[in-house]
Image (tube, rainbow, N blue to C red):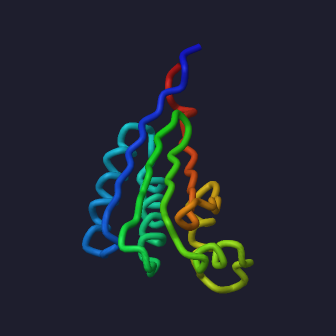
């Protein structure tokens, strides 16, 4: 059995909205290397944009996209405590960050780092149709 392969790209960019398209382009380019449906790519795009739209004091955001055999993992941060509070709160009836990320990701994790909190999103890929 061959060892699993993955690709990883880390992008550091200004939080300015003008750079969001760059992150989306990198996500789309990496996603084309696996069997990602249009809907799956759209879900990933919505999740990434929802995180990038958060106002933060830090001038730079880091996005790490990791492409594994069966999933795309996205790590975005650092964020202040506001995003963490929003993700740990029950969503209720409001359409907030938690509800959006839960709807478009298979897993959402909050990760504490030295420089703040990070959000890890996992989107599973449908690899059942691939030949072995």
Residue drawn 42% across the image and 41% down it: 8
Residue at the spot x=70%, y=79% of the render?
Answer: 91
* Quadrant of the image occupied by residue 60: bottom left
Quarter of the image for residue 99 reads bottom right
Q: Is 109 situated above or below 35?
A: below
Q: Which residue is more in the foreground, 111 or 88?
A: 111
x, y percentage for residue 14?
31, 69
The residue nearer to you, when weighing 95 against 97, is 97
Q: Is residue 5 above or below residue 44?
A: above
Determine the residue located farthest toward the bottom in the rendered image. 94
Above or below: residue 43 compared with residue 96:
above
Quarter of the image for residue 3 reads: top right
- Quarter holding the N terminus is top right
Q: In the figure, is residue 96 to the left or right of 59?
A: right
Q: Residue at x 45, y 66 (%)?
A: 46
Label tally: 0
Residue in the image at 57% along x and 72% along y: 100
Residue 21 position, x and y percent, is 28, 65
In the depicted structure, whether residue 7 falls above or below residue 77? above
Instruction: Pick out the residue farthest to the front.
Output: 114
Residue 97 image position (x, y, % from top left):
57, 76
The location of residue 9, given as percent across then percent down, is 38, 45
């Amino acid at each position: 059995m061959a060892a699993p392969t993955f690709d990883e790209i880390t992008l550091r960019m200004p939080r300015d909205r003008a750079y969001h398209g760059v992150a989306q382009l990198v996500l789309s380019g990496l996603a084309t290397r696996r069997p990602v449906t249009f809907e799956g790519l759209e879900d990933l795009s919505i999740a990434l944009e929802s995180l990038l739209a958060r106002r933060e004091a830090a001038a730079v955001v880091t996005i790490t996209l990791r492409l594994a055999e069966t999933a795309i993992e996205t790590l975005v941060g650092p964020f202040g405590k506001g995003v963490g509070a929003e993700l740990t709160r029950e969503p209720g009836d409001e359409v907030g960050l938690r509800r959006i990320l839960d709807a478009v990701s298979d897993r959402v994790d909050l990760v504490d780092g030295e420089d703040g909190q990070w959000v890890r999103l996992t989107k599973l890929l449908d690899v059942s149709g691939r030949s072995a």
